[in-house]
């Protein structure tokens, strides 16, 4: 499977600048800045780095960092890879625009199993009313995005909406998803590392918690470039990261590990590696196992003025 992905491609859009803004509903969102420009890139080409970054950001709130530090790290992740495309990741179909109702499998973000389509879409466009009056006028609010839209004209309309500058995602939702992925890795670590010292009930609980995370298989197509090329049609960056994560978790050659010294997630060069670097290993044995990990350096913790401003 790794070989198949290494010889294939995919595409997603990230912007040059993002910001965190508080909406009228009090929710803090990440969105592209008005002066930002879109860029198309291939997530598969940076899949290992992207998954490691996602896991390490997901580990941040588990370490007790204040909300401001967590937000900064999430913003840096989005700046590097783009928004997750949660709007198309949650429904049963990414092409939900053609229906009056969006149907949602069980998820941690929206409890309703069915939501009126216009209401659902508008929740991802909180900063101004978006034009939904017919397919032909869908992008009337974004005339400067026409070139980007034409590039992906064969994709479902909701996917193109996730690529617009007006699209936004709640910071808490991104944080929760990154944390879930990190939890998956921790589950795996605990299950195998402590297998002999845990009882059967605990092992069953860990197995069930892993089964709760069920990914959605992407579709694919062939493009005739310099040679026939397999393109994976991930309907969201969410699904791309999730599939790459599970491939890495099951990779025996370079397994994912949590560094014994700094708690950083890394791709181990061998199965028995427990440190992310020689420097980390030396510091661990020099300072001893009880060395305190770096604590949050935010001068005023979550009460700092930058966090409460509602923007960057």
Image: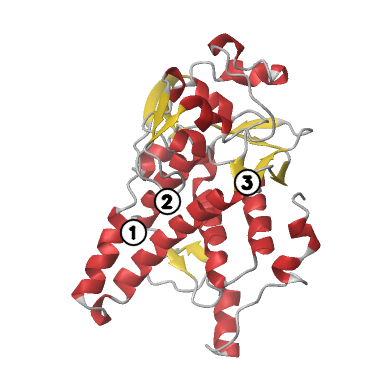
First in residue order: circle 2 vs circle 1: 2
**Of tags 2 and 1, which is closer to the observer?**
2
Badge 1 density bin: few <14, some 14–19, many ≥20, Cα 10 Å? few
Tag shown at residue 269: none
> Which SS class for mark 2?
helix
Q: Secondary structure at mark 3?
A: helix
**Label 2, label 1: how far apart the Cα atoms are:** 13 Å
| Nearer to me, 76 or 269 | 76
Q: Which mark is residue 78?
A: 3
Q: For numbered disc 1, what is the local secondary structure?
A: loop
Residue at 54% across, 12% down = 135
Estimate the spatial distance between the alpha carbons at disc 3 and disc 1, rounded to whole Å. 29 Å
Tag 3: Cα neighbours inside 10 Å, few (<14), some, or many (≥20)?
A: many
**Between discs 3 and 1, the one toward the N terminus:** 3
What percent of the width, then of the height, locates residue 211? 28, 54
Q: Residue furthest left?
A: 200
**Which residue is tagged 2?**
245
- Quarter occupied by residue 279: bottom right
240 vs 288, left or right, is: left
Res 252 label? 1
178 displayed left or right of 81: left
Q: From the image, state whether disc 3 or disc 1 is nearer to you.
A: 3
Is residue 196 visible in the rendered image? The answer is: yes
Count of numbered tags: 3
* Label pair 3/1, CB-CB below 8 angstroms: no
- First in sequence: mark 3 vs mark 2: 3
| Identity of the residue drawn at 50% across and 46% down | 47
In the rendered view, would you say 203 is above or below 48?
below
């Amino acid at each position: 499977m790794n070989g198949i992905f290494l010889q294939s491609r995919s595409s997603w859009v990230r912007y040059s600048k993002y910001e965190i803004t508080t909406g009228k509903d009090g929710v803090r969102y990440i969105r592209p800045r008005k002066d930002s420009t879109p860029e198309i890139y291939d997530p598969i080409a940076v899949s290992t780095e992207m998954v490691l970054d996602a896991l390490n950001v997901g580990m941040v709130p588990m370490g007790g960092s204040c909300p401001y530090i967590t937000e900064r790290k999430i913003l840096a992740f989005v700046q590097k890879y783009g928004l997750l495309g949660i709007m198309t990741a949650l429904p049963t179909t990414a092409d939900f625009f053609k229906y009056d109702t969006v149907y949602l499998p069980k998820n941690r973000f929206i409890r309703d199993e069915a939501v009126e389509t216009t209401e659902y879409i508008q929740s991802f466009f909180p900063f101004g009313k978006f034009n939904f009056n017919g397919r032909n006028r869908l992008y009337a609010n974004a005339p400067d995005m026409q070139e980007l839209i034409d590039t992906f004209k064969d994709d479902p309309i909701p996917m193109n909406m996730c690529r617009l500058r007006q699209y936004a995602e709640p910071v808490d939702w991104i944080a929760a998803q990154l944390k879930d992925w990190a939890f998956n890795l921790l589950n795996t670590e605990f299950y195998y590392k402590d297998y002999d010292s845990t009882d059967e009930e605990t092992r069953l609980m860990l197995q069930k918690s892993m089964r709760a995370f069920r990914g959605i298989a992407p579709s694919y197509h062939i493009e005739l470039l310099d040679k026939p090329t397999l393109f994976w049609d991930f309907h969201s960056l969410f699904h791309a990261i999730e599939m790459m994560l599970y491939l890495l978790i099951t990779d025996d050659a370079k397994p994912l590990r949590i560094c014994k010294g700094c708690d950083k997630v890394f791709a181990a060069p061998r199965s028995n590696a427990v440190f992310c670097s020689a420097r980390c290993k030396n510091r661990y044995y020099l300072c001893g196992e009880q060395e305190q990990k770096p604590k949050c350096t935010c001068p005023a913790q979550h009460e700092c003025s930058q966090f409460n401003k509602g923007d960057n």
